Amino acid sequence: MAKRKESLLDIFFDIIEMLIPVYVIYLCALWFTNKESFWRGVFYGLVVLIGLLVIAVIAKKIRLKRGTKWLSDRELLNELRKLTPDEFERYIADLFCKLGYQTTVSGGPYDQGIDIIAEKNGIKHYIQCKKFITQEVGVGAVRDFYGAIADQLAQAKGFFITTNKFTLEAEKFAEDKPIELIDGFKLIQYIKLAKKEAEKIKTTINICPRCGNKLVVRNGKYGQFLGCSNYPKCTYTEKIV
């Protein structure tokens, strides 16, 4: 059986859980030996417990805000499933931006099966998002998505993304079509890839060969690129490899 990957917060709560029986035994001993100290023990114990819980809540908020490594793959997937459909679409749009696409969220009641348009190297790709918890994406949904974009896929491709998984029939339908099915755990791999790309850009020191100023990441018509921070005086640019 595979060992479950635990976060630091999981270990923190495990320690609290182990301390509770010790604390109860301590209070029982005080009750029978020194009742005057019993209520003092109850008070201090509650203060410590509340303090630990406050620290745990703050730690959880910080780790989610930073996208820290504390989250295991399953924990991250559970957090994504808590998003509203609109929040999930915006999250995916931001994710593809980090992967070098220019994105436009077009989701809504009249989106015609296309939630996001992601453009890269002058080619528009189309994304459908399904924020499911237990429901699987069936062949009907994938077929409808393909029907909505089939006439626009000369060089482009479609991405169907869900936080759960696809049925076998849906996977077989997409096998010979320019549609990539991204289930929950494949989505996690995309998130990790985007994080690596962001770290690569962040940690790489780029100097403009023309004027010596720093190159910075900019968003353009065909995705992200490096441009001189001295723009518009210096118009030097280069592709992000």
Image (cartoon, grey):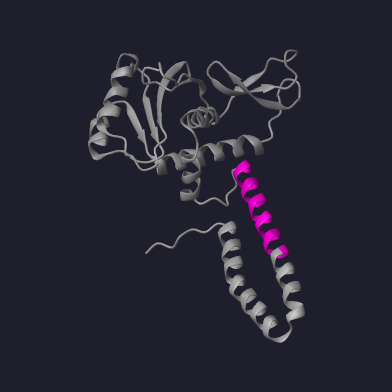
Residue at image coords 73%, 22%: 229
Q: Quadrant of residue 108?
A: top left
Residue 221 percent across, percent down from the top left: 55, 15
Q: Position of residue 17 (x, y in %)?
A: 57, 67
Residue 35 is situated, as x and y percent measured from the top left of the image, at 73, 81
20 shown above or below 146: below
Q: Residue furthest front?
A: 35
Q: How many marks?
A: 0
Q: Nearer the viewer, residue 26 or 186?
A: 26
Name the residue at the bottom extreme: 33
Asked if residue 169 lies left or right of residue 14, the reply is: left
Q: Which residues are magenta?
A: 47-66
The residue at the point 36 percent across, 17 percent down is: 112
Q: Main secondary structure of the magenta part?
A: helix
Q: Quadrant of residue 131?
A: top left
Q: Any magenta on residue 151? A: no
Work out which quarter of the rendered image holds the N terminus and state it: bottom left
What x and y, as percent, mark residue 59? 65, 51
Q: Which image quarter is the C terminus in?
A: top right
Instruction: Note whether 60 is above or below 17 in the view shown.
Output: above
Magenta stretch contains residue 58? yes
Q: Camera-side residue: 118 or 32?
A: 32
Q: Residue at x 27, y 36 (%)?
A: 171
* For residue 218, above or below residue 26: above
